[in-house]
Image: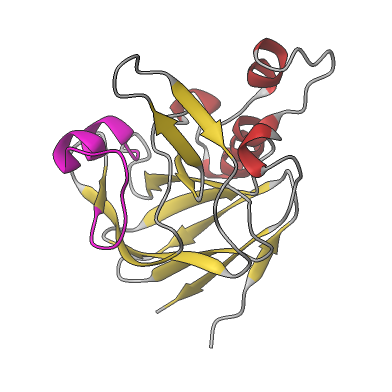
């Protein structure tokens, strides 16, 4: 049986996922976001696309049964189980030094999820410029229907909530324990994941 692997707070990792394998992302303590990005292992120019996915779904909240598409309109992952409140963001880009500098006014900003993803995918020969908008597991973003204003609210997950995907192609996955205070209810916590056949 696959064991849970822990990503420590404000860090990230990357690994391969074979077609047909399942990836479960777990919020072990609750109220913590995980950024997920995916690349075609055989051609990393093909990458997960929020625009294609939301266009084809015609909604912004995705859950069990929803496919996540690539920039070439191929299904990369499919959500096969969502044992959480079903609020995941696919609108906002991974937090970065610039996020913390521009939004929070930090003088010595953390590298954020963007920097963590960049470091994790570097061994696969993928440059930071290829990092797309992430599928933000458990991140709770609302959109005002009149003004279009976005609000990042604390996740409504509880300890042990999870989301499970199946790979529809051979992938490189990058995954983080998100580094932004606003996105995580004011504190940084770990994320766990497991890969199973």
Could one spot residue 133 in this view of the protein? no
Location of the C terminus by quadrant is bottom left
In this view of the protein, which residue sits in the foreground, 190 or 43? 190
The residue furthest right is 108
Q: Is 55 above or below relative to 82? A: above
The question of residue 113 being in magenta is answered with no
Query: Residue 195 or 112: which is nearer the viewer?
Result: 112
**Residue 38: x, y in percent?**
41, 46
Instruction: Please state if 146 lies on the left or on the right of 2 as rendered.
Output: left
Q: Quadrant of residue 108?
A: top right
Task: Please provide percent x and percent y for residue 1.
Answer: 53, 88
Identified at 47% across, 51% down, the residue is 173
Using the rendered view, name the quadrant where residue 154 is placed: top right
Position of residue 75 in the picture relative to residue 170 (left or right): left
Q: In the rendered image of this protein, does residue 173 appear above or below residue 17? A: above
Q: Residue at x 63, y 51 (%)?
A: 32
Q: x, y percentage for residue 117?
A: 59, 39
Q: How many marks?
A: 0
Q: Is residue 108 positioned above or below 182 on the image? A: above
The dominant secondary structure in magenta is: loop
User: What is the span of residues highlighted in magenta in the rendered image?
Assistant: 47-66
| x, y percent for residue 77 | 31, 56
Instruction: Indicate the quadrant where residue 61 lies.
Output: top left
Identify which residue, 153 or 77, lies in the foreground: 153
- Which residue is rendered at x = 23% and y = 62% of the image? 65
């Amino acid at each position: 049986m696959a064991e849970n692997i822990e990503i420590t707070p404000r860090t990230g990792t990357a690994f391969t996922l074979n077609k047909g394998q399942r990836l479960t992302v777990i919020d072990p303590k609750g109220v913590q976001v995980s950024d997920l990005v995916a690349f075609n292992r055989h051609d990393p120019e093909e990458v997960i696309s929020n625009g294609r996915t939301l266009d084809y779904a015609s909604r912004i909240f995705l859950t069990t049964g929803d496919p996540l598409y690539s920039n070439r309109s191929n299904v990369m992952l499919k959500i096969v189980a969502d044992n959480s409140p079903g609020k995941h963001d696919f609108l906002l880009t991974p937090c970065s030094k610039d996020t913390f500098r521009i939004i929070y006014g930090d003088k010595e900003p953390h590298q954020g999820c963007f920097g963590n993803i960049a470091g994790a995918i570097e061994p696969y020969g993928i440059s930071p410029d290829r990092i797309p908008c992430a599928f933000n597991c458990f991140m709770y973003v609302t959109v005002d229907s009149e003004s279009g204003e976005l609000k990042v609210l604390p996740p409504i997950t509880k300890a042990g909530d999870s989301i499970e995907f199946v790979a529809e192609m051979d992938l490189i996955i990058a995954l983080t324990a998100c580094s932004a205070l606003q996105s995580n209810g004011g504190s940084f916590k770990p994320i766990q994941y497991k890969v199973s056949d």
